[in-house]
Image (tube, rainbow, N blue to C red):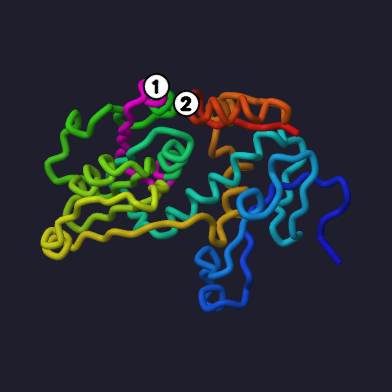
Amino acid sequence: MTELAVGEQVAVDPSLHCGECYQCKRARGNLCENWNAIGVTRPGGAAEFALAPVANCFRLPEGVNVADAALIEPLSCAVRGFDVLPRRLADHYLIYGAGTMGLMMMELAKRAGAASVSMVDINPARLETARLLGCSAAVTSADELVAPRGWDVVVDCTGVEAAITDGLGRVGKGGTFLQFGVASYGARAVIEPYKIYNQEITITGSMAVLHSFDRAGELWAGGLLDAEVFVSHHYPLDDYAKAMGQFREGVGRKIVIEP
C-alpha cells in the first residue's frame, strides 16, 4: 500500500536510518549508528534508475522542472541547520562560503527575518551571485566589514580551518556559531574557552537531514530559490566525469546530472 502512483514525479531524501538504534529511538536519525545514504553508502543517484523507500519520496507539484528539484536535498540540509539556530528576528548573520550551501543559508536567513546577512568568500564569481541574490555585504575577508559587537549568528559553510577559526572569533556576546560546512577529519580550529564562558557563546553543528526534507520541498515549491541562479550547469549522465571535474575546480554553482 502506498500513497504514490506509477509515473508520479518525486524528489528523494537519500538518508537511510535504521529506526532501531539509540539515536533513532530518540528521534535523532541523522545521527543513526547504522546510518546509510542513497548515492553515498548505497547505490543510487548517478544512474538511469534507482530504488528508494516510499517514505523517502516527496511528491513534486505538477508542472515543475524535475531537474531543478535536485535543489531540494541540499536545501533540506540547510533547513536542518536552521533548526539548531536561535532564529531571532533582526539578528545579524555572517556566513563563510558563498557556494550553493552558503547561498541557501543566506536565503533562509533572509526569510527568517535577519536584519543583515553578510557573505565571505575568496571566489569573486560566488560573491557576485550573493550580491545578485540580495545579501547585505559580500567581501573576501570579514576584516572589510564593520561590526564592533560582532555577529549574532556566524555560519561556516566552507569546512576550511582558517575560515572556521576566523568565524569563531567574530561571534558577538550571546551569539551562536554553526559548523555547517564539512571539514576533513583531521581539521582543527582554535577556540577561546574563557570567551565562550564569559560571553555565553554557543557552538553547535548540523549533520545532514533530519525531518527537514518535506519542509524544504515546500519552501522550494513556494519559490524560495531561483533555480536559474542556483543551477549553473546541466550535464547528461555520460558527462558525469566532466561534471565532477568542474565541481572540483570550483567552477559554477549547483551542477545537475540528468540521466
Residue 151: percent from left, percent from top? 23, 46
Q: In the rendered image, which quarter contains the C terminus?
A: top right
Magenta residues?
Answer: 109-127
Instruction: Indicate left or right for 219 with 165 as reference.
Output: right
Residue 125 magenta-highlighted: yes
Q: Quadrant of residue 225?
A: top right
- Residue 221 location in percent, x, y? 63, 42
Reading the image, the residue beneath label 1 is 128
Q: x%, y% of residue 222? A: 60, 42
Q: CA distance from mark 2 to mark 1?
A: 18 Å
Q: Which of the numbered marks, if any, corresponds to residue 249?
A: 2
* Point 41% across, 39% down: residue: 106
User: Sequence order check: which comes first, mark 2 or mark 1?
Assistant: 1
Outermost residue toward the front? 186
Regarding mark 2 in the picture, which secondary structure is present there? Answer: loop
User: Would you say residue 207 sits in the magenta stretch?
Assistant: no
**Against 160, is 214 above or below?**
below
